[in-house]
Amino acid sequence: MINLRERDRIVPKAACIPIGEAEFPSPFYPGVEYAAPARGPWNIVHVGMLLPESHQIFVCAQGCLRGVVLTAAEMGASGRFSTIAVRENNVTDGDMEELIINGVRDVLSKLKKKPRAVLVFTSCIHHFTGCDLSYVYRKLRESFPDIDFTDCYMTPILRKTKISPDSKMRMQLYSLLRPCDVTADAVNFIGNITETLKDSEIVKLISSAGLEIRDICSCKSYDEYLKMAESRLNISYNPAAKQAGDELSRRLKKKHLYLPLSYDAEEIEASLNTLSNELQVPPMDLSEYKERAEKELKKTAELLSGTEIAIDYTATPRPLGLASLLLDNGFNVSSVYADSFTPEEKEVFFRLKEKHGELKIYATTDPKMPFSAGNNADILAIGQKAAYFTGTRHFVNLLEGGGLYGFAGICRLMELMREAYLEEKDTKSIIQVKGWGCCA
Amino acid sequence: MRQVCSILSTYTADVSGVCSALYEMGGMVIMHDASGCNSTYNTHDEPRWYDTPSMVYISALSEHEAILGDDEKLIKDVCHAAKELYPRFIAVAGTPIPMMMGTDFPSVAKEIEKRTGIPTFGFATNGMHSYLCGESMAFRAITERFCSTYAKSTEENSNPAPGSSKNISVNLLGVTPLDFSVTGNAESIKKLCNENDIKVQCCFSMGSSFDELMNCTDADVSWVLSSSGLSQAKYLEKEFNIPYIIGVPIGEIYTKRLFSDLKEAALTGKSRPFFHVREDAPQPDKCDKAAPSYITGEPVFAASLRNALEAERDIKGLRILTPLENLCDRDMLRSRDITEAEEDDFFRLYEDADLIFADPLFKPALSDSSHARFISIPHEACSGRIFRKDIPVLIGKGFKKLYIE
């Protein structure tokens, strides 16, 4: 037994490994997990709120409701949010279907204005109890024929399966689009949480083809959202949105192109060429864009002059790709915060392993990490978690790539890095805001 | 309909209560869950999270492990972390899925303890009860397991006979940020004790070292400041003859009464029942002529605030209306108080109310036609961090600052 009067606690070292010694895709022991107080990344409530004129109803235990209720309350969206609490008797009595049907009816009877769409979120309990959700939704649709219902899921128990809850949420977000003929000269961006950079090559290419861009991030009404079904093409570039695009393509019978957000010049060019072919327009001359990106990289590297840089996986789906770009252009990237890497980063992982084996990979959920938050004011962080763990006030507040696509995206990122280098931010206040940038 | 909240929020659950109660004790707490409970806890329930690290983790339970009932993964992962972190103790607390799986928490704890040599607790929480239940079981378990050992190993621990002349010492029980936040309430209670020549033996569990907590058996009296402290107080009374009092010292008059009760309990060795400024008068009730007023919140706090309002503001017809369970004896409440209230109760009863004291997240229960005066008293266990800067310190004279139109 340990001595309960022991006063000297052991302060563990951070969970860190040089990439040269790290294993792909998961360098760390997958045990119990810590959650850093960086709250910017969106959760399923935030993503669901992108659907205009919709109402969310969560059905789960009190403990699970707490986080989502307060997510809505913090963003001032309590009026678009309701709950049905699952209690022990519902698990044992097998009356889960009745609880949901009657609960949703009760909620809708109390709303002053009927929503156009209702997102009903069931939870892990329903998954395991074999709740007959088909029956539930059939009954709800019969009761409220003028309201669109869709099945959404708060099932973290499935987060290590092929379709993560985050990907599933992005799939369900578009499930209310109804199959129809192509009637609009438009393409959709699917699965993003922010609009794509207006002056990026991809936006200009689509515009040059005479097509309008439709994106749920810019929809102001439910009708506007429904019109996304009329577009001729769906494009996704966030890995978490790829399955949503594929599912939409299968259901609406319209093509989906996955053109990943990348920091690799060849991959950017290949994606844009794929899009040109699809839109049947001549390939873009990207030399100017590329040249400008190189100039911006150079200018920024000179300003930073060896300043250490830390990147985390919440800032971009390609943290290693970004690290590689920066290292190849004279930046001093010292660390990447990520617990594992996607298959998309496999190639760059091994390239970095060979060329920059000293690059440190830090875990973010390892149990030793609560004791690892530093106070390194000199580091420039890209991403909220990197900012927290390094303790810097110089950071780029970026989520999921921030819509910074292509060479123009790299230019904008360089601007943000210079800004972060020159100006301090109130890290503690900013990173504790849940779902950064989301508004009801 | 029961269990439905069309607009109202929810209080935090038992598993967060366990974490909050044990946060400062140097132990490692594992929420046995897939994900979500941890970020909910440390975003909305734990104001100490950013600046004061503590070993609170999630087990990251997967579908595969849940279906196969793979407790070995949990045990192995906890042992792995314990060997790196050397916690003072380990606690594993349950959530809805382990409840469905029928996880045997006492056995899991026993196995972890056997492999690590570190005292381990298993709490069969399930995320379907309030934080008060979780805190209560954690406080009680820690006291039963450790304080008994400490008491036996400390020669001078034996309590002097009631009425001895030494300075009175007190255990403050049921104190966590979920009820007292970090805005100065816990400190104000300690200050009041000092001003009244009462030595604070320990505070379960904000601001006391583990050694101080373990010496709670040396105290003359326990002071239950929220429902979650009562079970622990009863244990200390039964095993160590330490009497207890109940109530939050709000307002000068009621605070004076509480200190009088505290001294009397210490001198006589007998616990004091919850004191009511007014008698319960169910039928006939003079207050019936006037519109009722409601206090919504943690039951001990709500009953104490009522005492202060009756004693110093002469407000009548005050009733407690709360979604929370009452873990205290029924005599703390009056006949028209309602605990475990549902949203529909709030819609119905708030409608005709004159005054309402509640967390701001209850305000949407007021209809457009309501004339009730709503006095916001943010409560961390309800609205989390949203209104933290507005959480008042009503302890002692602080009550004077409570403005009622």
Image (tube, coloured by chain):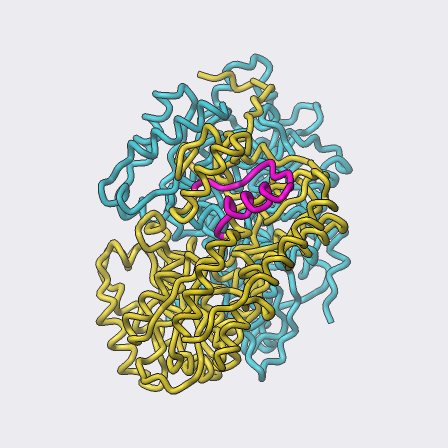
Chain colours: A yellow, B cyan
Q: Which percent across, then down, holds residue A365?
A: 48, 39
Residue at the image position 30 percent from the left and 30 percent from the top: B107
Q: Name the foreground residue: A39 vs B339.
A: A39
Q: From what the image shows, is residue A71 above or below residue A352? A: below
Q: Which percent across, then down, holds residue A411?
A: 63, 58
Occupied quadrant, residue B351: bottom right
Q: Name the foreground residue: A108 vs A423.
A: A423
Residue at the image position 54 percent from the left and 33 percent from the top: A360
Residue A402 lies left or right of residue B259; in this view the side is left
Q: Which residues are magenta?
A: A317-340
Q: From what the image shows, is residue B1 above or below residue A212? A: above
| Total numbered badges shown on the rendered structure | 0
Residue B205 lies left or right of residue A130; in this view the side is right
Magenta stretch holds residue A97: no
Residue A11 appears in view:
yes
Q: Name the foreground residue: A367 vs B369.
A: A367
Residue B293 appears in view:
no
Q: Which percent across, then down, holds residue A251?
A: 28, 73
Residue B393 lies left or right of residue B232; in this view the side is right
Q: From what the image shows, is residue A202 above or below residue B157? A: below
Residue at the image position 68 percent from the left and 56 percent from the top: A415
Tell me the quadrant of the picture where the N terminus of chain B can be found.
bottom left
Magenta stretch holds residue A329: yes
Residue B264 lies left or right of residue B333; in this view the side is right
Q: Which percent across, then down, holds residue B247?
A: 60, 47
Q: Name the foreground residue: B395 vs B61.
A: B61
Occupied quadrant, residue A277: bottom left
Tell me the quadrant of the picture where the C terminus of chain B can be found.
bottom right
